[in-house]
Image (cartoon, rainbow, N blue to C red):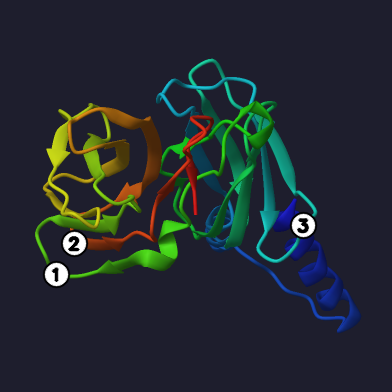
Amino acid sequence: MRVYRILERTIDEWRKQRQRVTISAPVLFEIIFALVGIQAVYAASLTGTVMNEAFVPLSGVSIKLSMEGNLTPLRTVLTDKSGVFTISDLAAGKYTVRATSYGYDIFEVQGVLLGSEDHHLRRILLETSVSAGNCIVRINSTSHIQHTSRPDIDIAGRVLVGHGEIAVVSLMMFAENEQMPEGSIPTDKQGRFRATVRVAGDIRLAIEVQDGSGRVVVPQQELNVCWAELGDSIRLPKIRLNRSGLGQFCY
């Protein structure tokens, strides 16, 4: 349609100026192909995968796409049985992707920049909503990440513990297509920890608190931190476990 409109406007201008223009077939085809090329620049597609906290694909999740700064959705699609969604024929620009599903917290991906090429989002992890017992969603880790020239990922944080208590922290990485082995992270008496990871992926922490004799004071609670690339330096806010045993983390 865009090509036809441009051609119609061009013909109208020729008629107004009462000019007789003769265009050979090869030249006409070149013009049409050039205009189609312009149209193709505005025909990118956006794909992604939605999973739950256990990295199980979620079907039927509503994906709303809107222009950055505009809450009115341009397109709405649902994820398939593999948790995958695709939105085609998108104009170049900056978009916001909003994922919603009953029982899960709303998740937004902002600043998705589309040009002439198709764009694939990292997987979107939906977390159980507050109504289902969750204390909070994930850390807004984007404000705590700094990219460096390191060949690995550096992650550090602090678990708030009481006098005589010990924080036991384990880290699990979920790479693009595989789950990496879980590893224990040493902590000091103040609950501070630091770890180095040598593969990009989603970072999950499992934390419990024990007393001096090794008895569990606060049962293990989990947190999906963020997707991290090699070179990321991640500093987490102070982590306060939910001592009532419900949900996950409070801050």
* Residue 161 relative to residue 124: left or right: left
Cα separation, mark 1 vs mark 2, equals 5 Å
Q: Which of the 4 quarters of the picture holds residue 38?
A: bottom right
Which residue is more in the foreground, 48 or 91?
Answer: 48
Q: Amino acid at mark 2?
A: Gly
Q: Which of the 4 quarters of the picture holds residue 146?
A: bottom left
Residue labelled with disc 3: 71
Q: Is residue 161 above or below residue 232?
A: above
Residue labelled with disc 1: 149
Q: Amino acid at mark 1?
A: Ser
Residue 95 placed where, x, y %?
61, 58
Residue 174 placed where, x, y %?
27, 33
Could you tell me if the residues under marks 1 and 2 are in contact, i.e. CB atoms within 8 Å? yes
Residue displayed at 30% across by 42% down? 203
Q: Secondary structure at mark 1?
A: loop
Residue labelled with disc 2: 231
Q: Is residue 161 above or below residue 15?
A: above
Could you tell me if the residues under marks 1 and 3 are in contact, i.e. CB atoms within 8 Å? no
Q: Secondary structure at mark 3?
A: loop
For label 3, the crowd category at 10 Å Cα-Cα, with few meaning under 14, some 14 to 19 and many 20 or more, is: few
Residue 69 placed where, x, y %?
70, 66
